[in-house]
Image: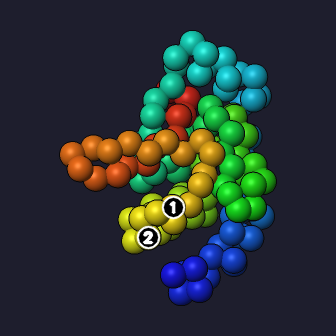
């Protein structure tokens, strides 16, 4: 699956993609501390501002810091991770900041973002 989806290239592009800071990390953290945030599903993340550090393992290098916007490349990677996790239970990818929740028997994935 990694080869067929060219994950090495996708991962490189993700880390080289245009990161857009929207607010200071301290401001994003303050939004979270004051519960001015929403838990947003992967499909709705593009353009949203994260309140958490998003770190895929491997490589274990932070991808987004609080206050940065999700772009299409990052969302596509998270969609791949969701698909991979469904196809290979027990070998799930570990992405710090991505919250897994079971809803009506299906796993869904969310990231905490600044409330609009």
Q: Which residue is mark 2?
A: 88
Q: Position of residue 1 (x, y in %)?
A: 51, 81
Q: Which residue is mark 1?
A: 92
* Nearer to the camera, 25 or 1: 1
**60 to 87, vertically: above or below:** above
Q: Position of residue 71 (x, y in %)?
A: 60, 55
**SS type, badge 2:** loop
* Nearer to the camera, 21 or 75: 75
**116 to 59, vertically: above or below:** above
Q: Residue at x 68, y 39 (%)?
A: 53
Q: Residue at x 75, y 49 (%)?
A: 62
In the image: residue 82, left or right of residue 76: left
In the image: residue 7, left or right of residue 84: right
**58 to 107, vertically: above or below:** below
Q: Position of residue 32 (x, y in %)?
A: 59, 21
The Cα atoms of the two marked residues, 1 and 2, are separated by 7 Å
Q: Position of residue 50 (x, y in %)?
A: 61, 37
């Amino acid at each position: 699956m990694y080869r067929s989806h060219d994950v090495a290239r996708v991962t490189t592009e993700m880390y080289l993609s245009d990161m857009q800071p929207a607010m200071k990390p301290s401001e994003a953290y303050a939004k979270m501390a004051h519960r001015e945030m929403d838990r947003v599903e992967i499909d709705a993340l593009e353009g949203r501002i994260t309140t958490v550090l998003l770190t895929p393992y491997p490589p274990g290098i932070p991808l987004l810091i609080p206050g940065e916007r999700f772009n299409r490349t990052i969302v596509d990677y998270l969609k791949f991770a969701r698909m991979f996790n469904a196809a290979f239970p027990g070998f799930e990818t570990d992405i710090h900041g991505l919250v897994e929740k079971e809803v009506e028997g299906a796993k869904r994935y969310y990231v905490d973002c600044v409330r609009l």
